[in-house]
Amino acid sequence: EEAGVLLGCAPDTVLGAGAQTARRSIARGDIGVPASAHTAFVGPGPERWHPNPAFLFAAGAGPLLDMGPYYVTTLVSILGPVARVAAVGTRARATRVVASGPLAGTSFPVEVPTHVEVLLEFEEGGASHSTLSADAPAERPPLVEVTGSEGLLRVPDPNRFDGTVQLLPAGGSTWIERPAEGAAHGRGLGVLDLARALRAGGVARADGELGFHVLDVLLAAEESIAEGRFAGVESTARAPELLPEGWDPGAASL
């Protein structure tokens, strides 16, 4: 800020049509007041398909820091900034074996927890529980489910830009499906939003403040695992503003 520089940060999937449709539904009051959330990323691990996966199990990675940013960014966009974190982590195996590519059959060490349970307490009073695991024998669909005072809402896969929003009103038994509304563009939306903010004199939605806060939350989770206690989050961030309805990433801005 002192240098007058705008900073953007991944992930920008929260700017995709799937996440934006879900957030508009919440903003309309479709589930009442959002109070809590449950998320899950569960599967066997990337060594099944990645030709050189060792770095994904080294310090600074693992499911917490590899996939956690997508889920925590989505949670912050809905429930606001995080105040404190509690987490536990386990490691099913000390080594793993590459399953494909030129290194197939070779093993590598696992340096980080590969199954993590994370509790987040938000500044505005909400709470969430997340499972991030590479230890499951089979893959389950990604889950981001928000509980409100008047219903439940499932956000599409936070690692994608599209998807279908699912809504279950209070007292209902059948999920209502709503296709994502908005431009079907992929990665690069954050860069575009940053460029438009620079031109218009505004603030990027997926900005450095948000990215730093999400990283701070994830590192607090690592601290909690290591020390066996709640860890405070010193940083804060604003939830990114919703994109305007009908926002067109292909529109000329010159």
Image (tube, rainbow, N blue to C red):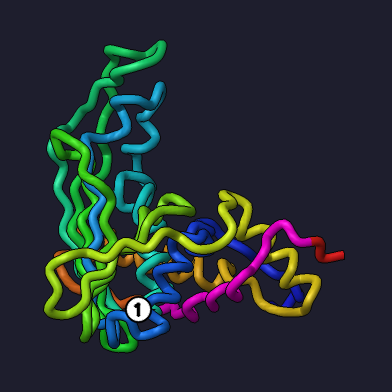
- The residue at the point 54 percent across, 78 percent down is 241
Category of crowding for the residue at label 1, using alpha-carbon neighbours closer than 10 angstroms: few (below 14), some (14–19), many (at least 20): many
- Does residue 54 show up? yes
Q: How many numbered discs? A: 1
Magenta region, residue range: 234-251
Task: State the image coordinates of residue 164 (x, y, percent, origin top left).
Answer: 37, 57
Residue 223 location, quadrant: bottom left
- The residue at the point 20 percent across, 56 percent down is 131
Task: State the image coordinates of residue 13 (x, y, percent, origin top left).
Answer: 49, 57
Q: Give whichever of 24, 104 is nearer the camera.
A: 24
Quadrant into which the C terminus falls: bottom right
Query: Is residue 236 highlighted in magenta?
Result: yes
Q: Give whichever of 165, 155 is nearer the camera.
A: 165
SS at circle 1: helix
Q: Give whichever of 235, 254 is nearer the camera.
A: 254
Question: On the rendered structure, is 82 left or right of 171?
Answer: right
Question: On the rendered structure, is 81 left or right of 167?
Answer: right
Which residue does the numbered mark 1 point to in the structure image?
Answer: 79
Query: Is residue 99 highlighted in magenta?
Result: no
Question: On the rendered structure, is 196 left or right of 229?
Answer: right
Q: Which residue lies furthest to the right in this view?
A: 254
Q: Is the magenta stretch mostly helix, strand or loop?
A: loop
- The residue at the point 32 percent across, 13 percent down is 104
**Compared with residue 96, is residue 190 higher up or lower down, i.e. above or below?**
below
**Compared with residue 114, is residue 52 higher up or lower down, i.e. above or below?**
above
Task: State the image coordinates of residue 252 (x, y, percent, origin top left).
Answer: 81, 61
- Does residue 219 show up? no
Residue 220 location, quadrant: bottom left
